[in-house]
Image: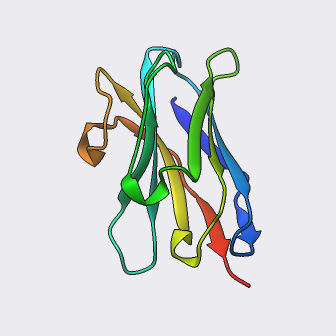
Amino acid sequence: QVQLVESGGGLVQPGGSLSVSCAASGLTFSPYAMGWFRQAPGKEREFVAAISYTGHTTYSTDSVKGRFTISRDNAKDTVYLQMDTLKPEDTAVYYCAAASGYFGSDYFKYNYWGQGTQVTVSS
């Protein structure tokens, strides 16, 4: 059974930093591209960042470029999202997802999803 388990969410002040991680089990991690998505209350789920299966290529949405960094450790079957200079509009549930044979922002191309972790940016 494939499981993606996010952790590391929480409450942080504007301008602060937070790192979330996603541990995979039940699948051979390294061939999968990994992505982070987020969903704020009353809004659709949106793409945040993705990383290729090798980790050599990353892609992120414009609103987080220069502030968020996606990385992965294939030896630990884990993907990370380092979030710096956080803004209140970054408040959302953050989900990680795994895609086989695809690298990008298309929600429907991802095969497996985690349950999400809440990130709240507030003073």
Q: Where is residue 27 in the image (x, y as percent from the top left)?
A: 51, 20
Relative side of 74 to 114, left or right:
right
Q: Where is residue 85 in the image (x, y as percent from the top left)?
A: 65, 62
> Who's the residue at 49% across and 19% down the image?
56
Residue 62, by quadrant, is bottom left
> Who's the residue at 46% across and 73% down the image?
40
**Total count of labels:** 0
Q: Is residue 10 above or below residue 2?
A: below
- Colouring style: rainbow
Query: Along the line of sight, which residue is nearer the eye, 50 or 2?
Result: 50
> Who's the residue at 58% across and 53% down the image?
67
Q: Position of residue 60 (x, y in %)?
A: 42, 45
Q: In which quarter of the image is the C terminus?
A: bottom right
Residue 94, by quadrant, is bottom right
Q: Is residue 43 above or below residue 37?
A: below
Q: Residue furthest bottom?
A: 123
> Who's the residue at 36% across and 62% down the image?
45
Query: Along the line of sight, which residue is nearer the eye, 69 or 44?
Result: 69
Q: Position of residue 13 (x, y in %)?
A: 74, 75
